[in-house]
Each structure stands twice: as C-alpha cells, then as structure tokens.
Amino acid sequence: MSSNLSSLVKTKPYQIMRKLLLSLFSLIGMSLGGQTLTMPTLPSAGVTYPLSIKADTVPHSSQGNWDFSNTTTDATGTVTFEPISSTSYSTNYPNATHVKYEDGGIFFLGFDATEYTFHGEMSVITTSYTNPLVLHTYPFAVGNTSTDSELNISFTCNGCPPSMERDDASYSEALSSGTLTMPDGTVHSNALLVYNTRTWNDGQTGSPTCNLFLEQWQWWVGGYPMPVAQTVELSTTGPCPPNVGYRQSKFLVGNPIGIQEEQTRQVDAYPNPATDRLFLKNLTLGGSEFKIYDLVGKAVQKGTINETSDHISISSLSPGLYYLVLENHHQWIRFIKE
C-alpha cells in the first residue's frame, strides 16, 4: 500500500539499526533530572485499575506541576492487564507479554528491560504485527524521544473490504516532570509528562487512505504499566467512517499500584450490599488508611481502619456503587450502599 508514511521508513533492515538508535536516544537526556521510567513490575496474575473519565480534553501546561483537582469527570471505567501466558491469545501474538482490556477492546503489549511495544489489537479492527511497534524505550526521561513505524500491516474489520492494510507510526517525547494532583485529590509527587502521537493510514493498495491522527499527553508514574492520567484527541482526514474522531481524558482513581483482581485480594468487605456499616476481614497488615470514591472518581469519605476497629461507617453515603481504596494494602474493593 502506498501511504504518507512510506517516506519515513525505507526497508526492513532498519529494524536492527532502529533498536540501536532508540537505545542511544534513551541515554541522551538522562542527566536532565526528574522522573525516569523503567520497565514496570507487573504481578503474575491479572491487575485491574479503576478510572474516572471526562468526555473532553483538559487544558494543561507542558511543564509541571499539574493540578487537576478542579477537573470534573462524568464517567468511570477500568483497565485490566493480564499476562498473555494465562490467555488463549499467545499463539497469535507470540512476542507480546501482556494483554490490556480497555474500552471494550483487547490490546497486545510487550514490556521488557529496554522497550515498551505494541503488538496488535482486537477492537474495531483486528491486527497482529510481525514486528512490534516501539512506543517508547526504557529508561525514558526528560529530553528523550522515541520514533518508530511499521508498514503494510494487514487488518480485518466488520464491513471492511478485503486486503486492508495499515501503516502505523509512533512518536514519543518526554517533556517534563513534576507533581501531579488528580481530580480525586491523589497526589503523585514525581510524574513524567510524555507527548505521544500515533498516525495511522488505512486502506487498500492503490486506493486513497483514511488517515487518523491520535495526539496524547500522558502522565506516567514509576511502577504503573499505563499513564495515571492522559488527555487525548483523535482527528481524521480522507475517506474515513463518520464520527470516528473524539476527545477524552482519563484519570487513575486513588493510588492502587500493584492491586490484584478482587478474587485474589487479601481483605474482604461484607455485607455487600451494605446499609450502614461495612466490615473488613483479613485486615492483618497493621491497619490502613482508606478512601471511598464515588462513580465520578470523587473522594467522598476517608479515614483509618485497623484490627481493633474492623468496620467503616457508611451511613452518610447516598445509595449507589462505590470503591473502597485501602492505601497500605494497595487494594480497592467495589461495594454497594443500599
């Protein structure tokens, strides 16, 4: 397929040189200070993170610090990471290490000591990359950039004609680091702002392409396999399907790094649903500070609980669905107040 990306990449021998250059770029700028991203440590089981979502971009500076405490979100969601070895997808995506489930799509990612890579997806389209696309390298610090492209990637989708191909290009630049305050009041003291673009050219060989441009501002914090905050805009040109473009912002709720799926959690809450008190069992790690978040990601209650005070009064909460975040246990629990 002829595309706008053809001039960016010559032939496949660039693959080896690309990795050498990206490693070099990662070393440049490491002396500039601030947060340095390295490969996150992901648990052997699945991990789910709660999100609050705004259906628009949010204004921000390219330099820290950043305060989103006055940002109002209007929806909630989750993102789940799972080792690909525990799924049925490893045959089609043999070089991916993890699967990400988000917004109804399934995305295949790679994490290793030198780079963070994209291997394909099963969402609106289905793709499997022969050579993974490098999203950014590790370590990644202020002043680093990362550029990569993959051409002629076959894909399928519902209603698409046959022989569809995609060209995919990614550019990432670490702009600055600083303190990040989230809409729920959570403070991350050392966040790294990364500006990323993805450019996709989709179409049949010899035909006009649908050109999609995704612009993302992502705030990364060490240890997490995803940005803890991001604001994105997707725009299109050419013969694209209608209503593809969008604007959106997402924010991690609380600071639940390393939390496990609910079925593997250490602490259980009961009864659930509850009316006036929520009891906790297996609270054996010396107690914990807690916060309770509503569905728009607002902290509505906080306090401390320990072995001698094994319940939380929720009588002041309105009926609905909430998230209880146990800070010291790196765990969140979903419960219903009746």
Image (cartoon, rainbow, N blue to C red):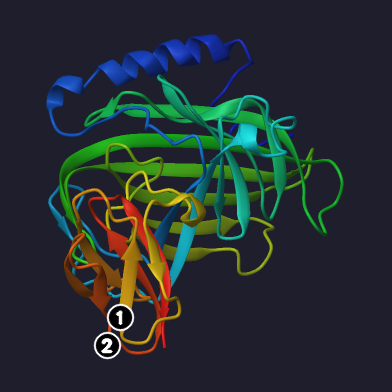
Location of the N terminus (image quadrant)? top right
The residue sitting at the front extreme is 308
Which residue type does callout 1 highlight? Arg
What is the x, y in percent for residue 329? 28, 50
Task: Give the residue drawn at x 18%, y 70%.
Answer: 302
Say if residue 113 shows up in the picture.
yes
| Cβ–Cβ under 8 Å for marks 1 and 2 | yes
Viewer-nearest residue: 244 or 92 = 92
**Residue 75 sits above or below residue 3 on the image:** below
Task: Give the residue drawn at x 31%, y 41%.
Answer: 194
20 left or right, relative to 186:
right
What is the x, y in percent for residue 135? 46, 33
Image depth: mark 1 or mark 2 in front: 1
Alpha carbons under labels 1 and 2: distance apart: 7 Å
49 left or right, relative to 167:
left
- Residue at which label 1 appears: 277
Tell me the quarter of the picture where residue 335 sits: bottom left
Please rate how many residues cluster around mark 2, counting C-alpha atoms within 10 Å: few if below 14, some from 14 to 19, many from 20. Answer: some
**Residue 58 sits above or below residue 221 on the image:** below
- Residue at which label 2 appears: 315
